[in-house]
Image (spheres, rainbow, N blue to C red):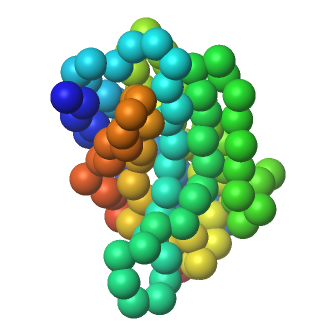
Amino acid sequence: QVQLVESGGGLAQPGGSLTLSCRGSGSISGFFKMGWYRQIQSPGNEREYVATINSFGDTNYSDAVKGRFTISSDIAKKTVYLQMGNLQPEDTRVYYCNFYVAPRDYWGQGTQVTVSS
């Protein structure tokens, strides 16, 4: 079993920055992938992809955040980070961390990010 605990959400002004953290515990070994998703703005519980990093350090980003957000990880601490820069009001969402440890996905509890002046 894998447990994920997120931290770091909050309020930022447009153009500002925030860093999210997500620490995993439990059976995490071998190849795995870590990432961040956020709740889409339309009604419903769907989540959209933000960024991922795998245990080799390969990263990918959505077009919406590329160049503004940076994903990184500390494998020894089983922690993934999301540095968010040049935040915009449309980045206001609940952000969820995700660990894929074969054969299933695990999710954090979600953390609110609000961008407002």
Which percent across, then down, holds residue 71? 61, 38
Quarter of the figure with residue 23: top left
What residue appears at the point 52 percent right and 19 percent down from the top-left corner?
Answer: 31
Total count of labels: 0
Which percent across, then down, holds residue 84? 60, 51
In the image: residue 61, left or right of residue 21: right
Which percent across, then down, holds residue 43? 39, 89
What residue appears at the point 30 percent right and 47 percent down from the top-left corner?
Answer: 108
Which percent across, then down, holds residue 75? 48, 15
In the image: residue 65, left or right of residue 104: right
Quarter in which the N terminus is drawn: top left
Q: From this view, report whether residue 58 is shown above or below residue 47.
A: above
Residue 44 visible in the current orientation: yes
What residue appears at the point 72 percent right and 66 percent down from the top-left corner?
Answer: 64
In the image: residue 22, left or right of residue 47: left
Q: From this view, report whether residue 24 is shown above or below residue 99.
A: above
Quarter of the figure with residue 94: bottom left
> For this rendering, which residue is in front, 39 or 12?
39
